[in-house]
Amino acid sequence: MKLFLLTLFTGIGSVLLFGQDRPQNGVAPSFPDAYILKNATIIVSPQKTISNGYILIEKGKVKDIGNILLKPANAVEIDCKGKTIVPAFIDLDTDLGMQKPPSAERRDRTPQIDSKKEQFFSWNDAVRPEFLSAENYKTNETDNEKLAKAGFGFALTHLNDGIVRGTGSVIALGSHPVLSSLFAANVSTHFSLEKGSSRQTYPSSQMGSIALLRQTLYDVKWYQKHADNATVNLSLEALAKQLEKPIFFSTSEALEILRGDKIAHEFHLKFNFYGSGNEYQHIDAIKKTGATIIIPAHFPDAYNVSDPYINMEIPLKELKHWELAPSNPYLLASNGIPICFTFGKNKSEKEFWTNIRKAMERGLSFEQTLTALTITPAKTIGLEKETGTLEIGKIASFSVYSENPFEKEADLLETWTFGQPKLYKEAAIDGLDGNYRILVENKTYNVDITKKGSGYEGKQTNAVKKEYEKVAVSVSSNDITIQLKDSINGIIGTILLHGKINSKVGVFEGEGTDVSGKWVKWNAIKHKKIDADKKNKTLVTDSLYKNKIWFPNMAYGYDSLPKQQSYIIKNVTAWTNEAEGIVKNATVIVENGKIHYVGTGNFKKPVNAVEIDGTGMHLTTGIIDEHSHIAISRGVNEGGQSVSAEVSIGDVVRNNDINIYRQLAGGVTTSQLLHGSANAIGGQSAIIKLKWGYTPDEMLVPNAPKFIKFALGENVKQSNWGEEQTIRFPQTRMGVEQVYVDAFSRAQKYMEEKSKGKKDSHRVDLELEALAEILNKERFITCHSYIQSEINMLMKVADTFGFHVNTFTHILEGYKVADKMLKHGAGASTFADWWAYKFEVLDAIPYNASLIHEQGVVVAINSDDAEMGRRLNQEAAKAMKYGGMKEEDAWKMVTLNPAKLLHLDDRLGSMKVGKDADLVLWTDNPLTITAIPETVFIDGILFFDRKQDLERQARNQKEKARIISKMLESNNSGGEKKTFQPTEPKFFHCDTFGEEGSSEHNGH
Amino acid sequence: MLLNKRNNSFVNSILIISILLGCTTASAQEKTMLLKNGYLHTGNGDIIASAAIGIKNGTIVLLKNSLAYSHSVSDWDTIIDLKGKHVYPGFVAANSTLGLTEIDAVRATRDFHETGIYNPHVRSQIAYNVESEVIRTVRSNGVLLCQPTPRGGVISGTSSIMAMDGWNWEDATILANDGVHINWPNSTQRMADNRAIQEKSKDYGTQKQELYSFFEAASSYASTKKPEKDLRYEAMTDCFREKKRVYFHADDLQQLNDIIDFVQYFKLSAPVIVGGYDAALVARKLKDAKIAVMLYRPHSLPKREEEAVNQPYSTAFKLQEEGVLFCIQNEGDMEAMNARNLPFLAGTAHAYGLTEEQAIAAVSLNACKIIGIDKKYGSIETGKSATLFVSDGNALDMRTNNVTFALIDGKIVDLGNKQKDLYIKYKQKYQQGIK
């Protein structure tokens, strides 16, 4: 089809030639070669509009454009007085006519571990670059026309399935007597983080999708240099070529744009992103990517908010998003982010235009709007020379409207495709607006006739009764019919008139019937003009919505992010976790995010420090949760394989989990977000500070040591996963050992080959890279474990391969092997008192922490639970009850000890000058049941305060009421509305499988 | 058997008692006992800073200020000095699966969820495992009575009130078949996990109507003189004769309002809401309708994002303020093993508003009132059963909860458990340097 383009624009031959290769039944279709459209408002480009303009079209392209043009002899002349010509829009995100490859049957519930494809394709069913959209395109006129009617002339179509989705092709949407609708074949490349219809077990999480995409891109790099007959891979071959084309990356939320951007960076690629509509929540970060965002011209429907019982279930974030979503295009564009509009989920062209105008009402200028519909998409797909504007030489694809559709509701009259028209609606004669005196027999009716869309409506201004006011007016070519209501001699009825229009002098005349059915003559004379614009709604722009965004944009979000400040906390009982122990009447000074002073002596007061009186209160460093699964997007387990060292929670941290705030309120300041325990070698973890409101990257502890999750026991061998899950190796503890032996043997071999080979000669293997880091002592292990046998086993395997298990988490039988752990140098992060939830915790005892601690092993108490995470102080205190641990030691189990286990004790975990000012002010001894966190600081920033929390609760409520009232207005004025469907809150636990959280019980 | 070394004299005295009585489990207690000088939390809100508690035949026969009570050693078979220690009524694990489950993930040990939708005839009493290791760990924290409750379906079954010590379920029974448990249909689309799958397709109105119809039928059965026997209706009959309670498991506002209508329509006596997440919003109505609440686990997350972070901690206080009769229960994740933390659930409610004595009542006397055994249990008063325990410090605080002595119906409870045994075993291992 590129051939078609070439011939058209090099001007060789005429359009008719393109039908040539196909045998013709009879004589080929006839159609004019040239047109001249005159007296139109021509929107040439976002910057240029010509009123009363001429446009000359020849052989499918714009030959000339201007205020007055001479009509070439062969051109058909069309008068477009009063009409507006708009360049064809380009939709970059459709799946028009895509013939989906057959997907696997769902009947079989046993896990599919291997690909169903042949060896010479990708090993993963979700990677299918070999899918070529042009070859799988089948014209669907109904779907194409739906877009054409909204003003679109071109659409990029591609398969919406899988992580690597193959190519996209450009479709010409309108109808043309001879041209095919395929315009540019296989011109783009498509990625996503959605596994789609693949039934293969891997990947089962978003982090797995990220790893798979990255590995695939590494494989392509390697393949380009090292492929031979033995390694032929058609998927990699296809993808290698596609990487030179514009790449489109599909996302379901703004954070995925940031995730995709990291991949783009890593491989020096440029991604364009299909946005989801909530990009305004991360404007600054998205701006930094420099990427073009294709956003839906569709905004969420209002909820039906007539029932307060249901309203209480609607999360504030949904309401806020409803209110702010129409501002998304403006907020992006006004920040200089290139945007394109896609038709998206709009049900009709009417809805599309309503939404476009809604976006404009929120501040998006005409220029920005049209650019997003034409020039930016044209550039993005590399068709800016042919499409996007109506400049001379470009394809003559455009739409003709009764009015300027960007200004008011207008009717689509024609669409032009490569210089050929398709008529949708006949335009009414323009300029009939006015006040008319209609004389029927001897009676005069004063009627205002005004234009509405492509037709007219009327109103009787001297009607006897209000209900007689409305006058139906219908205009068709040169004929007019008018229906008037009146009461004559007690008969109420309708006067039906039909006549001819003499628009030059503003006169109608004709015949009709009166209320009694009598045949009458009539005429009408235009009396005066009406100012038509007064009746049309003009755009009122409101660009102030930016101030309504909260960080994060949900309940308890900040209006503006809290900032670092200096603090002096006086007269407080300070739990230093240092040699000084618990210091009474202490003063603690915080400056530049660090602890500046701790003591009872003299101190120099920093300038502008906020003073806090800590009388009667206790100050500690923040709680560190060594084992947490909050703040994670779409999957805590990459359980698709037994070894998934390549995946990283760091790739999928999400900053809008309410549990961040809730745990902050419980005094937690740092959490290690661990991969789950579904497989022997899980994924890499992320260590975050609970900096509520900040972006995921800002939450990550800078230069944190690297960690990876391992797991042993029942979850790894899928003991409690149901009878279908008996295929993946291992199914026994015996097998678990061999998974490790195999993985580390492979890693050793990989390292050997890597060190021997030349630079870039080896195939980068992300899984083995991570394992190599363990062998190189660059990555620490946190291992989920219960039973003494397996704990012992892993330490032996580690000894054999010369690595080290840093932390055993859960470790409920650690008390049985504490001496061996000490010898190995492993620490323990355990539960205070959990047991009896599965067979392998039968010997769990609440004295575990005390016993292990007594042997000299570093012990932490962790949560592994979104609820328990917010009262870890209570859990630590249980060690005093069970085993009689000393108060300070118990407290260290949730502060200093986890800091040690995370190798962050140089920055966190104790109140030492120079360490991070992560502090919690408690109402009481933090180990007592009555202790409540009053104030929480992270890096010297006040993130939580009970008084502020109360204010924020009230503010949440007020905000909700405000938006609900607004939504009610929309409900009552007939806006689209849907019923809210509450869902049970879902959480990630150690054993949660798949991308969705679980409302099931925590299986740990 | 007892672990606390700081109180050797006390430990010794208990050991002596054990030897004297020659029992560790549930043997008849015929003799008399005086517990003196303990700091007594009666459970009904009162405190006696130094109490003398006299027990005869398992019943409290004397309750006085120790300082005002003079006696001779021969007046009592056993005298225990509890100076510096706290005495509490036995705590009650209401709405629990204790004794019905041992290991959550092992199906063979789960005996609380019967198949079927309407199961009022299914009784927990006979499945109660007195030898449960879980029970032993729970009672050693001061929880001495429980209400094993079936789960699942619309009517999940009939609960009973059991002592957490006994030779068999018969002698452990405190009150057989105390009530029928209804999982009130969900007013929104959200479905509780324990709801039978078949019910998911039906809308709220239909499900509610079915419950009405079932109750209509059961009620008419109950008023028929010699009906043709029907197991389900038979099990419901006592609900209409004020002999059996109806427990409505429900959380949402819509449900709570509909339950108020329902209990009034069927004139149910002493109805109970179990869960009651939104109960504070209709507290006045519940009080007026004399509906008690077995409140959801305070250690849970708020259901809705914009709610107060500490909402689950402070709901108890709101109900207390409004005068609703309530107790705190522990249904949820790992509820059986977690029942040993019931004292700390009450402790948290104390931190967020309840007074200490109100918090104690919330897991003792209030629970017994709601269940209907408060004439005999729930508080330490003369005439009531000697079901109580002694803790070194504040039992509601995990830092100080250390239960060293407990009685159920005057019988000394063995506070040992497998976990303590393992602790001692491995402590010894390390002390002896065994590798």
Image (cartoon, helix red, strand yellow):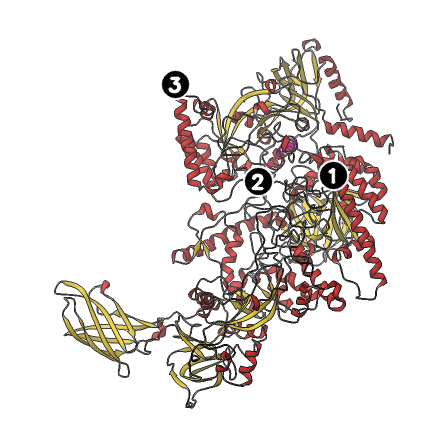
Q: Secondary structure at mark 2?
A: helix
User: Do marks 1 and 3 both belong to one polypeptide chain?
Assistant: no
Spatial CA distance of label 1 from label 3 is: 59 Å
**According to the image, label 3 marks what residue?**
B225
Discs 1, 3 touching: Cβ within 8 Å? no
Give, as a three-letter code, the residue at label 3.
Lys
Q: Quarter of the image containing the N terminus of chain A?
A: bottom right
The residue marked by circle 2 belongs to what chain? B
Q: Which stretch appears magenta?
A: B329-340
Q: Is residue A391 left or right of residue B170?
A: left
Q: Position of residue A748 (x, y in %)?
A: 83, 54
Question: What residue does disc 2 label?
Answer: B312
Rendered-image quadrant of the C terminus of chain A: top right
Q: Quadrant of residue A404?
A: bottom left
Residue A151 image point, x, y percent: 46, 71
- As displayed, is residue B36 above or below residue B263? above
> Nearer the N terminus, badge 2 or badge 3?
3
Instruction: Find out whether residue A565 is within the magenta segment.
Output: no
